């Protein structure tokens, strides 16, 4: 028995709806906004594991890396704009261009960037770095999982940064306030006095490249290290930019159980929702 014309019409309408929905999502994620989640501690203290962000796609222009799966539909880079120092940007990480990273823009094309005793020297002038109150954060399930995956002994990077209060575990980190020449200020962590990247020779940032750093200076593979698969990222091509971080839309401590709906609420960190940059 053949289907009735009305059934065929309903099927066609449903397929048409799905195609339009897919096209809408593709345009939205490619050219307007996209979600991004934080899987590591490289941008502490501003970003914690389990934060979910909205990333704006238009501020820096568009390239193939703006598109889902890096589809090669955009030649080069169009409507291009260079970030400002201090912007927090998402980009495809060199050398493979497969993974999305999020870091802070420190050096622009033409800048000379040096790291001396843990302090950023920008164009020959030290970037002011002021000690402020320690960062104290509770140890969460997603921090424990990350520590296990990294092979760390403690979720607080090192045992000496861990403390217990009323039976609960916390991490306490030395925290500093940096202020770039354009007036942009932000907090950074620098927990090791003589870490592997605390001293780096001056680097001239060439045209079309950016010097990117994580705010957690001892736990970030960034432009201080050569671009290697699974290692540093070197100087990042502007063409690799995906978008600019705008604000946090959700945050979870990782303790939720999909089969226990009430834990979805208890795991949420509602105080972090809406935080901008």
Image (cartoon, helix red, strand yellow):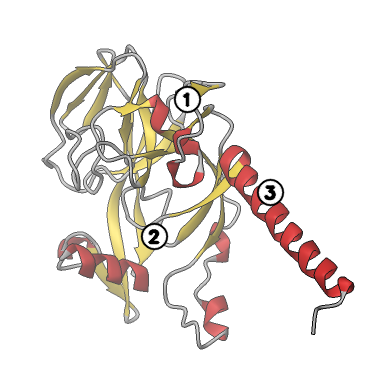
Question: Which residue shows up at 60% across the image and 37% down it?
Answer: 31
Q: Label 2: state its secondary structure.
A: loop
Question: Which residue shows up at 15% across the image and 66% down it?
Answer: 151
Measured as percent of width and height from the top left, residue 198 is found at: 16, 35
Relative vertical location of residue 179 with respect to residue 217 in this rendering, above or below: above
Q: Earlier in the sequence, mark 3 or mark 1?
A: 3
Measured as percent of width and height from the top left, residue 28 is found at: 64, 45
**Pointer 1 local density, CA inside 10 Å: few below 14, some 14–19, many at least 20:** few
Q: Label 3: state its secondary structure.
A: helix
Tell me the CA gap for discs 3 and 2.
30 Å
Image quarter of residue 208: top left
In the image, 29 versus 86, the foreground residue is 29
Q: Earlier in the sequence, mark 3 or mark 2?
A: 3
**Residue 90 appears in view:** yes
Q: How many marks?
A: 3
**Pointer 2 local density, CA inside 10 Å: few below 14, some 14–19, many at least 20:** many
User: With 99 as the anchor, is 33 left or right in this view?
Assistant: right
Measured as percent of width and height from the top left, residue 62 is found at: 52, 30
Q: Nearer the viewer, mark 3 or mark 2?
A: 3
Question: Which residue shows up at 32% across the image and 82% down it?
Answer: 167
Measured as percent of width and height from the top left, residue 125 is found at: 28, 15
Q: Cβ–Cβ below 8 Å for labels 3 and 1?
A: no
Relative vertical location of residue 263 with respect to residue 170 in this rendering, above or below: below
**Pointer 3 local density, CA inside 10 Å: few below 14, some 14–19, many at least 20:** few
**Residue 140 appears in view:** no
Q: In the rendered view of the protein, which quadrant contains the N terminus? A: bottom right
Q: Label 1: state its secondary structure.
A: loop
Relative vertical location of residue 275 with respect to residue 72 in this rendering, above or below: below
Q: Which residue matches tag 2? A: 49
Image quarter of residue 85: top left
Q: Which residue matches tag 1? A: 75
* Disc number placed over residue 24 in the picture, else none: 3
């Amino acid at each position: 028995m053949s289907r009735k014309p009305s059934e065929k019409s309903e099927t066609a309408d449903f397929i048409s709806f799905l195609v339009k929905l897919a096209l809408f999502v593709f345009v939205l994620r490619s050219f307007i906004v996209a979600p991004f989640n934080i899987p590591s501690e490289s941008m502490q203290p501003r970003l914690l594991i389990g934060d979910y962000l909205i990333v704006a796609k238009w501020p820096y222009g568009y390239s193939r890396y703006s598109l889902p799966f890096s589809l090669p539909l955009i030649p080069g880079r169009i409507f291009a704009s260079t970030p400002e120092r201090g912007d927090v940007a998402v980009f495809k990480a060199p050398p493979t261009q497969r993974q999305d990273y999020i870091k802070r823009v420190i050096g622009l094309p033409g800048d000379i960037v040096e790291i001396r005793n843990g302090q950023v020297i920008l164009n020959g002038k030290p970037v002011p770095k002021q000690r402020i109150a320690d960062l104290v954060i509770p140890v969460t399930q997603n921090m424990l999982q990350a520590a296990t995956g990294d092979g760390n002994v403690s979720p607080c990077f090192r045992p000496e940064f861990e403390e217990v209060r009323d039976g609960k575990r916390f991490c306490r980190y030395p925290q500093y306030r940096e202020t770039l020449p354009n007036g942009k200020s932000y907090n950074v962590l620098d927990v090791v006095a003589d870490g592997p990247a605390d001293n780096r020779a001056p680097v001239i940032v060439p045209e079309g490249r950016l010097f990117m750093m994580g705010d957690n200076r001892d736990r970030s593979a960034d432009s201080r290290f050569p671009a290697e698969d699974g290692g540093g990222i070197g100087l990042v091509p502007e063409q690799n930019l995906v978008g600019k971080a705008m604000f946090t839309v959700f945050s979870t401590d990782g303790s939720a159980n999909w089969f226990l709906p009430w834990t979805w609420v208890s795991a949420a960190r509602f105080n972090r929702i809406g935080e901008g940059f």
